[in-house]
Image (cartoon, rainbow, N blue to C red):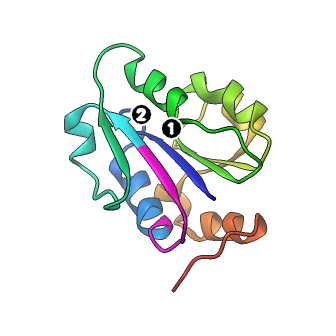
Amino acid sequence: MLQVLVDADNVVPARVQPVVDLLGRVPGVRTVVTGRSSALAQVGWPADAVVEPCSGWQRADLALARAYRPDRFPLVLITGDGDFGLLAARHPGPVLVISGAASTALRDAATVVDPAVVGVEPVRAWLAAVGVSVNG
């Protein structure tokens, strides 16, 4: 099962929405989204996404860390926050980071794509390379 963790406070909607739309065509995705209510309201989240409004220093990060499941399946992190570098480095499966300014820790541990600059085709290619099918 593909796991998607989104820190809506750290990535602008122009980067998030195209990826969310693409992942909406992937069966069996588990999406968890955290952030300020104002950030959450800027993106159309899938109906089955777990959306947890959080505000205050590190609360969104803690909510995502609690939601994370270490398994061998692919992980997509939508964040620019370097706090997730260790999680990405230790994840047993492949990791994709969606970010415009990913930290060095994230760039060292994962494939990084900025869909606002390059579109979603690199995301689609990564999904295919790790064995995840996109319907349509």
| Callout 2 touching callout 1 (CB < 8 Å) | yes
**Disc 2 residue type (three-letter):** Asn
State the residue lying farthest toward the top: 57
Magenta-drawn stretch contains 31: yes
Q: Residue 88, position in %: x, y?
A: 70, 35
Describe the element under mark 2 as helix, strand or loop. Answer: loop
Q: Is residue 25 left or right of residue 113?
A: left
Residue 126 pos. (x, y %): 70, 63
Amino acid under disc 1: Thr
Question: Residue 128 appears at what percent x and percent y?
Answer: 72, 72
- The residue depicted at 61 percent of the width and 63 percent of the height is 123
Q: Is residue 19 magenta?
A: no
Asked whether residue 2 appears in the rendered view, the answer is: yes
Task: Residue under label 1, please give it.
Answer: 79
Number of on-image labels: 2
Residue 34, above or below 55? below
What residue is shown at x 43% (from left), y 60% (from top)?
20
Tell me the element at label 1. Answer: loop
Residue on which the image places disc 2: 10
Q: Counting other residues with Cα less than 10 Å from the Cα at mark 2, is it few (<14), some (14-19), or many (20 or more)?
A: some
Residue 8 seen: no
Compared with 11, 131 (above or below) is below
